[in-house]
Amino acid sequence: MRVAIHQPQYLPWLGYLDKLDRSDVFVLLDTVQFKKNEWQNRNRIRTAQGWQYLTVPVLHEFPQRLDQVRINNQTDWRRKHVQALETHYGKAPHYGRYASLFLELLARDWERLSLLNEAVLSALAGAFGITTPIVKASQFEAREEQTGRLVDLCKAVGADCYLAGAGGRGYMNLEGFQAEGIAVEVQDFMSPEYAQVYRPFIAGLSAVDLLFNCGGEGFRYVRDARTR
C-alpha cells in the first residue's frame, strides 16, 4: 500500500492532487507547525495581469500546530475570494458547473484553517473523480522527529511504500524507512499545459484553474503527463 503525507493546503495546486491520486491513502499532516507565508493558507489563481494570491487570514501564536490555527474572521476574506473567482473565472467554460462547490464552502463559518483546507481538498477530489481515502495525522500517535513521524504514520495506516515529494530528499533519512521495511518513492510531477482563460499559459496555479477551464474530466491531462 502506498501512502502520501502532506500538510493541508488551501486551494492546492495540481502537484498536490497528483500525489493524492497516486496514493492508496492520503494523510493530512495537520500536526506540524504552521508556517507563515507558505501554502497552508494561500494559493494562486490566474488573472488578466498574471496571477494573484488568495489568502486566508489567520490568528496564530508561534509555534502553533496547524490543527490549532484559527481563521481571522474579522476580515471579509470570504467575500473577496468569491469575488476574485467570479471575476477571473466567470467566463471559463466550466465555471458555472463547479462554482457552487466553492461558493457554498466559502459561505460557511470556518473557525479552524485545517478544517477549511480539508473540506476544499475533498471538494476538489470529488470534482476530479479522485477516490483516495483521506485521513488526518492527528488521529494517530507519531514521533516529532521528521522521518520518525513519517515512518510512524506509514505504519499506522498499514503502508509499505511512502510517496515523497521532490523536496523530500533534503530532509528524509532513508535508512529510517528501510529499517521498518518501507519503500520510498519520489514524486516526479510534470505540470500539463491546457487552455486557460488568459494567455500565455501559467503553470503552478491552484487546481481550481484546471477545474474551471477544463472540468473534472481535465484531470486526464495530469494523468497523461504522468505516464509520459
Image (cartoon, rainbow, N blue to C red):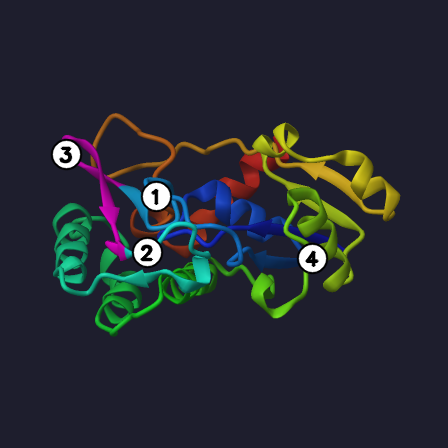
Kindly report which numbered mark, 4 or 2, lies closer to the viewer in this rendering. 2
Q: Compare residues 137 and 225 and report the one nearer the observer.
A: 137
Q: Are marks 3 and 4 in contact (CB under 8 Å)?
A: no
Real-space CA distance between mark 3 and mark 4, rounded to the nearest whole angstrom = 42 Å
Q: Earlier in the sequence, mark 2 or mark 1?
A: 1
Q: Compare residues 13 and 192 and report the one nearer the observer.
A: 13
Report the residue marked by disc 4.
153
Picture quarter with the C terminus: top right
Real-space CA distance between mark 1 and mark 4, rounded to the nearest whole angstrom = 25 Å
Tell me where the magenta segment starts and ends, as one range: 45-58
Kindly report which numbered mark, 3 or 1, lies closer to the viewer in this rendering. 1
Kindly report which numbered mark, 3 or 2, lies closer to the viewer in this rendering. 2
Q: Is residue 67 left or right of residue 154?
A: left
- The three-letter amino acid code for the residue at tag 1 is Lys
Residue 156 in magenta stretch: no
Q: Earlier in the sequence, mark 3 or mark 1?
A: 1
Picture quarter with the N terminus: bottom right
Kindly report which numbered mark, 2 or 1, lies closer to the viewer in this rendering. 2
Residue 60, label in figure: 2
Q: Earlier in the sequence, mark 4 or mark 2?
A: 2
Report the residue marked by disc 1.
36
